[in-house]
Image (tube, helix red, strand yellow):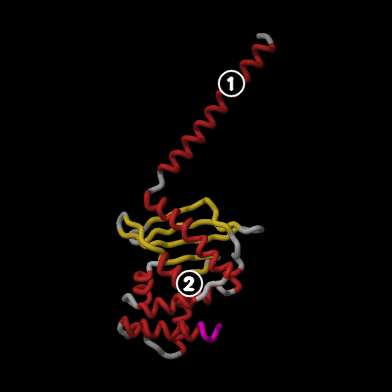
Amino acid sequence: MSLKKFSLGMMAMFAFLCSGFVSESYLSKAIANSSKTDLQTTAENRIKEMYPEFINLVNKGANEQSMMKFALANLDTTAISKNFCGEKNDKLIESLVNFLLWRLKTATLQAVKEYKLGSNFHTVEKNSTLSTKCILNGKNDNVDMSVIFSKNSSKLGKIREIIVLNIPLIDGAKSVMRKYFEKNGIKINALTPNERAQKCCEALDNFVKENA
């Protein structure tokens, strides 16, 4: 076999292998994309819509009005309230929003100023919740963010929790409440839902006032 024919044969084989690799890669990507459920896609789109507003609150500094607007637009306030006291309570939501306002102004959360939302998402579905983990890209490092949504069958609800830097922004209020209850001898489980809501508000309002 001449050198010319050998070279042409090797080139043809290389081209065939490359085409097979590209086809396999394309097929794998197509399968991965098609395996996403509608709920997962909806969750990703919701996060993409929510994040610019969230990071703007961190960057420019939130106030009570802008924080409440964000909460009502994005958070499942009913589920969150029931998680804390057992029933929907508007006053408790106001106290939680003030706690969130304090949280966003802390040095820890301020560390993620101007971080960009990455394009990779990993979602886990459970019976009543859907959790999506994503990456926030900074100039020198990346950090994790998880967003937990309420879920009812095939319908995606609003956000129940946002976790940044392993800090649960909403559920983190429970540690503040627990310390207040222990300090003041409050047996929270012995109270009615409305009474629990009042004591939760007291705990958060006192904490925010003392740590202003």
Q: Kindly indicate whether the residue at mark 2 contacts the one at mark 1 (C-beta within 8 angstroms).
A: no
Q: What residue is at 44 percent from the left and 81 percent from the top?
A: 177
Q: Position of residue 161 (x, y in %)?
A: 44, 66
**Where the N terminus falls, by quadrant?**
top right
Q: Is residue 26 above or below residue 107?
A: above
**Where the C terminus falls, by quadrant?**
bottom right
Q: Which mark is residue 67?
A: 2
Q: What residue is at 47 percent from the left and 78 percent from the top?
A: 98
Q: Quadrant of residue 201?
A: bottom left
Give the extent of the magenta segment.
208-212
Q: What residue is at 31 percent from the left and 76 percent from the top?
A: 87
Amino acid on which the number 1 mark rests in the picture: Met
Q: What residue is at 43 percent from the left and 39 percent from the top?
A: 31
Q: Position of residue 34 (x, y in %)?
A: 41, 42
Q: Is residue 85 above or below residue 167?
A: below
Instruction: Give the residue at mark 1.
Output: 13
Q: Position of residue 204 (x, y in %)?
A: 46, 82
How many numbered markers are drawn? 2
